[in-house]
Image: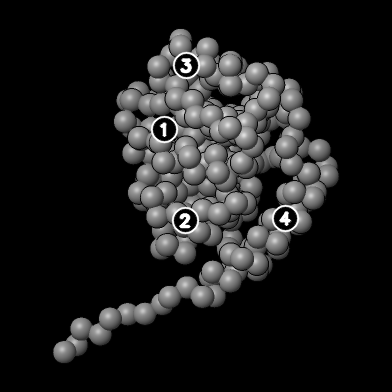
Amino acid sequence: MDLSVVIPVYNEAENVQPLFVELRDALARLGGEWEVLFVDDGSTDGTFELLRDLQAEDKRIQVIRFRANAGQTAAFDAGFKAARGDVVVTMDGDLQNDPRDIPMLIAALEGWDAVCGWRWPRRDPWIRKVSARIANAVRNQVGGDTIHDTGCTLKAFRRECLSHLKLYRGMHRFFPTLLILQGYRLTEVKVSHRPRLHGQSKYGIRNRLFVGLVDLWAVRWMKKRQLRYEMDHSE
């Protein structure tokens, strides 16, 4: 398998079918073998049933279903463990990421272990833009990173990177930092961002900004406590 696309979804019934149509067209241009893994994070609006219908029509779709909502990090973890591709791409299920950017991300992997999307310009309400800007600034200041848009879900990874990630709830916000801690090399590219047309955002100030800042201190602790040593082979 050349490529796996992992997509967490939670109550995105209006978006999953048009998203897969766009994905299928974009990935067809790449050639090679690919799969799309939808991880249904306990949806209650019929999302899972629609995904099963899509899977019946196209066997390149895998559907993972949680019994109850477990959060986006858990959805990514399940998707990573099931993915078979040499390259793994992550994206949102709300149609705000453009599947046509995936070939650009994969091309940018040359010489790198992971590529982070940078949404430019952002197509979100002003309150989300402000909270994201503050969160990114604080995250980079405290964590010592330089990624412009760590909250952008559209990313591409070499599969071996993900096998070393130990994830906890909320850690999807810190994929770049966690990979850097493991010694992997990251770059970023500007990607498209589209306004949400259907459904509702699952994040607001409380669960995006404040919770994310609390999690940041855990990551900072991990960085400060990271083991660093070199073996002496002189004798």
Left or right side of 40 for 2: left
Using a 10 Å C-alpha cutoff, classify the residue at mark 1 as few (fewer than 14 neighbours), some (14 to 19) or many (20 or more): many
Occupied quadrant, residue 103: top left
Q: CA distance from mark 2 to mark 1?
A: 20 Å
How many residues crowd mark 2 within 10 Å: few (<14), some (14–19), many (20+)?
few
Q: Mark 3 to mark 4: distance in Å?
A: 35 Å
Q: Are marks 3 and 4 in contact (CB under 8 Å)?
A: no
Looking at the picture, which amino acid does disc 3 mark? Gln
Query: Residue 210 lies in what quarter of the image?
Result: bottom right
Which is nearer the eye, 87 or 55?
55
Q: Which residue is mark 3?
A: 55
Vertical placement of residue 67 versus 76, above or below: above
Badge 1 element: strand
Instruction: From the top left corner, tell me how far across and down residue 107 is, in percent.
Output: 41, 38
Q: Position of residue 135 (x, y in %)?
A: 72, 56
Indicate the position of residue 85 as horizontal and vertical percent values. 36, 35
Query: Around disc 3, counting alpha carbons within 10 Å, would you say few (fewer than 14), some (14 to 19), or many (20 or more)?
Result: some
Q: Give the residue at mark 2.
A: 166
Name the disc covering residue 211, or none.
4
Disc with the residue nearer the chain's start (2 vs 3):
3
Q: Position of residue 102 (x, y in %)?
A: 49, 33
Check disc 1 and report the residue beneath it: 4
